[in-house]
Each structure stands twice: as structure tokens, then as C-alpha cells.
Image (spheres, grey):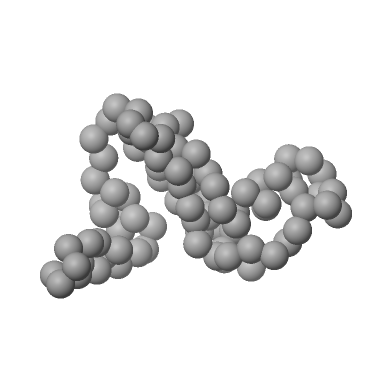
Amino acid sequence: MKERFKLFFDILSELNREGVLQDLILIGGWCQNVYKEYFGDPPEISTLRTADVDFLIPNPPKIKKKTNLSAVFERIGFDEEFSMLNGYTK
């Protein structure tokens, strides 16, 4: 679990270092951990969650800085995979 928390904070730190974190909204399963930390671990906040990190990007996007996210995530240790068939990168 410690490794997941470190990876989570590494992702946030890198996005902050790139100057784009302030333009994103953390949503999904990791919110519970942030809420538990901020509100002193109340029993009302479930520990059930997924391991992925989800961000909401406002529409229209308000990100002002062009950022190479592939390079950001590569620094953290992620590998990039491109689907020629579907045209997406993950």
C-alpha cells in the first residue's frame, strides 16, 4: 500500500511541477484517501476504492500550459502504449 501512496504523490508532484495540477480536479477512488487524511480518518469515509487516479478536466479545458504528459509519466516509471487500431494512447 505504501508503494501506491508514493506513486499517487509522485503523480501529483510531477503534474504540479509541470504547472497543470491546479487546472485539474481529483475525482474517483483516491478522493477518499485525501478526505480521510484531511478530515482525520472519520469512519463515515469508506476505504473501498479503485487503484487508478482519475482527474476531471473542465470543459472547456482551462489548462494554459502545453505539457508532454507522456514525458511526465515516463519520469515516474510508466510505459506508453499506443493503439494503432483505436487511435488512443495509454
Q: Is residue 57 above or below residue 28?
A: above
Q: Residue at x 73, y 61 (%)?
A: 47
> Is 33 on the left-hand or right-hand side of 52?
right
Q: Quadrant of residue 83?
A: bottom left
Residue 36 in picture, x, y percent from top left? 75, 48
Q: Is residue 21 above or below residue 51?
A: above
Residue 28 in picture, x, y percent from top left? 56, 53
Q: How many labels, in total?
A: 0
Q: Quadrant of residue 87?
A: bottom left
Residue 64 in picture, x, y percent from top left? 29, 27
Q: Residue at x 68, y 52 (%)?
A: 32
Q: Is residue 58 above or below residue 43?
A: above
* Closer to the camera in the image, 78 or 86: 86
> Quadrant of the image for the C terminus?
bottom left
Q: Residue at x 24, y 68 (%)?
A: 81
Which residue ends up furthest to the right in the rendered image?
Answer: 43
* Closer to the camera in the image, 45 or 40: 45
**Does any portion of residue 13 appear in the rendered image?**
no
> Quadrant of the image for the N terminus?
bottom right
Q: Quadrant of residue 76?
A: bottom left
Which residue ends up furthest to the left in the rendered image?
Answer: 84
Residue 5 in picture, x, y percent from top left? 59, 58
* Closer to the camera in the image, 3 or 20: 20
> Is 72 on the left-hand or right-hand side of 34?
left
**Does any portion of residue 64 appear in the rendered image?**
yes
Q: Residue at x 28, y 30 (%)?
A: 65
Q: Is residue 41 above or below residue 47?
A: above
Which residue ends up furthest to the front in the rendered image?
Answer: 59
